[in-house]
Amino acid sequence: MLFLSNMKIGARLALAFGAFIVLLLAICGYSAWSSSRLASDLEATANIDLSRIQLADALQQQGGIVARASRELLLVDGAGQIKKQRELIKKALADTDESITKLAALGATGEVEQAFATVRETKEQYTKAVAKFLETLDAGNPDDARTALLIELRPV
């Protein structure tokens, strides 16, 4: 500190302003780097995560369609109505497969990978439960189909 007291006031002010400018440049550099990182994270969130959310919502909607059509199959008795509900189930299951394929194409790591594995496993269980329900309904026993709907399909 002795060297500072030996300096003239102009030199001390110049040194202080120089240190201030260096500190300001360091803060600006860190801010630019942080902003760049934030922009890339925002881009990933906007493009990939939003797509995942939309596909997950589509999966939920398709599951609802299958559930409503399954219920309607137990309630309707006209051949045209039964055919319509079966087509809805078939289309919803095909759309579910398409959504799962799109989700897989987005890639997954870490927690997302575990969540996607759970979704895929649940989808397989759901598809098997729907197939069992339809098979039981085709056998001509609506009471067993109702039981399959409540016991097999509903928990999945």
Image (cartoon, helix red, strand yellow):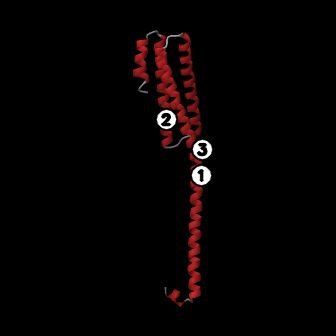
Q: Which comes before the other along the chain, label 2 or label 3?
A: 3
- Image quadrant assignment for residue 46: top right
Q: Position of residue 76 (x, y in %)?
A: 49, 13
Gap between marks 2 and 3 measured at Cα:
21 Å
Q: Which residue is mark 1?
A: 40
Which is more foreground, mark 2 or mark 3? 3
Q: Amino acid at mark 3?
A: Asn
Residue drawn at (51%, 23%) of the image: 66
- Name the image quarter holding the C terminus: top left
Residue drawn at (53%, 18%) of the image: 85
- Image quadrant assignment for residue 144: top left
Q: Give the numbered dot on residue 47.
A: 3
Looking at the image, do the residues carrying marks 1 and 3 touch, with CB atoms under 8 Å apart? no
Q: Which residue is mark 2?
A: 117
Identify the secondary structure beneath mark 2.
Answer: helix
Q: Amino acid at mark 2?
A: Ala
In this rendering, the count of numbered labels is 3
- Residue 34 vs 44, above or below: the answer is below
Mark 2 surroundings: few (<14), some (14-19) or many (≥20) residues within 10 A: some
Q: Position of residue 75 (x, y in %)?
A: 46, 15
Looking at the image, do the residues carrying marks 2 and 1 touch, with CB atoms under 8 Å apart? no
Gap between marks 2 and 1 measured at Cα:
26 Å
Q: Position of residue 94 (x, y in %)?
A: 57, 25
Gap between marks 1 and 3 measured at Cα:
11 Å
Identify the secondary structure beneath mark 3.
Answer: helix
